[in-house]
Image: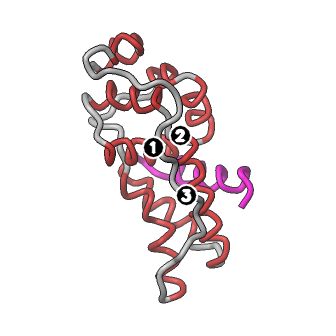
């Protein structure tokens, strides 16, 4: 699946959902119109964007925004980030401080979003999807940060969320 199609589906889900919590159902509705091969391609493209966002700077931003961030929490943060759409995702990759412009939320995680393609695929085919993923990156890209000083790396985020 090309990026334009992928992000168009994400945008459709984002704009048709009345709240962040409704984005998984909105994505489900968007994916229901696709053929199983396209749903699998969506899942593979989704994984590529999750992997691309596996960076220390984004993890630091997630840590500040959520008041802490475990390995799993960072996975779910990246799900939330993808759900915000191409513009926010791209801006955050270039400069995590750009996330200071997003609306306030109780937490910046959306785990359910990552499972939607699998659920839709299984509902359509009666079998589990077996996507062809590249290996998960070993370590985040970039420089690691220290929990005691991470807020200093992201002053705008710290001022808003810390």
What residue does disc 2 label?
Answer: 53
- 10 Å neighbourhood of mark 2: few (<14), some, or many (≥20)? many
- 10 Å neighbourhood of mark 3: few (<14), some, or many (≥20)? few
Q: Which is closer to the viewer, label 3 or label 1? A: 3
Position of residue 48 relative to residue 132, above or below, is above
Tell me where residue 38 sits by quadrant. Answer: bottom right
- Is residue 8 found inside the magenta-colored segment of the image? yes
Q: Secondary structure at mark 2?
A: loop
- 10 Å neighbourhood of mark 1: few (<14), some, or many (≥20)? many
Which residue is at 32% across, 21% downward? 146
Mark closest to the chain's N terminus, 3 or 2 = 2
Real-space CA distance between mark 1 and mark 2, rounded to the nearest whole angstrom: 7 Å
Real-space CA distance between mark 3 and mark 1, rounded to the nearest whole angstrom: 17 Å
- Is residue 26 found inside the magenta-colored segment of the image? no
Q: Are marks 1 and 2 in contact (CB under 8 Å)?
A: yes
11 on left or right of 128 = right
10 on left or right of 138 = right
Q: Secondary structure at mark 1?
A: helix
What residue does disc 3 label?
Answer: 135
Where does residue 56 sit, x and y in percent of width and height?
Answer: 45, 30
Where does residue 24 sit, x and y in percent of width and height?
Answer: 43, 58
Q: Secondary structure at mark 3?
A: loop
Which residue is at 66% across, 55% downward? 6
Position of residue 6 relative to residue 59, above or below, is below
Which residue is at 53% across, 76% downward? 130
The stretch of residues the image draws in magenta is 1-19
What residue does disc 1 label?
Answer: 78
Where does residue 55 sit, x and y in percent of width and height?
Answer: 50, 34
Q: Which is closer to the viewer, label 3 or label 2? A: 3
Mark closest to the chain's N terminus, 1 or 2 = 2
Q: Which is closer to the viewer, label 1 or label 2? A: 2
């Amino acid at each position: 699946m090309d990026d334009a199609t992928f992000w168009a589906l994400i945008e459709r889900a984002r704009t048709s959902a009345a709240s962040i919590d409704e984005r998984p159902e909105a994505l489900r509705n968007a994916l229901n119109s696709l053929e199983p091969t396209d749903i699998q391609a969506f899942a593979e493209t989704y994984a590529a964007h999750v992997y691309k966002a596996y960076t220390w700077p984004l993890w630091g931003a997630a840590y500040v925004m959520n008041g802490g961030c475990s390995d799993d929490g960072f996975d779910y943060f990246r799900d939330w980030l993808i759900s915000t759409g191409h513009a926010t995702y791209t801006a955050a990759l270039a400069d995590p401080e750009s996330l200071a412009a997003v609306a306030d939320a109780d937490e910046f995680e959306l785990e359910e979003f990552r499972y939607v393609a699998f659920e839709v695929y299984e509902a359509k085919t009666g079998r589990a999807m077996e996507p062809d993923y590249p290996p998960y990156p070993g370590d985040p890209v970039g420089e690691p940060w220290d929990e005691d000083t991470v807020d200093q790396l992201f002053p705008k985020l710290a001022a808003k969320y810390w």
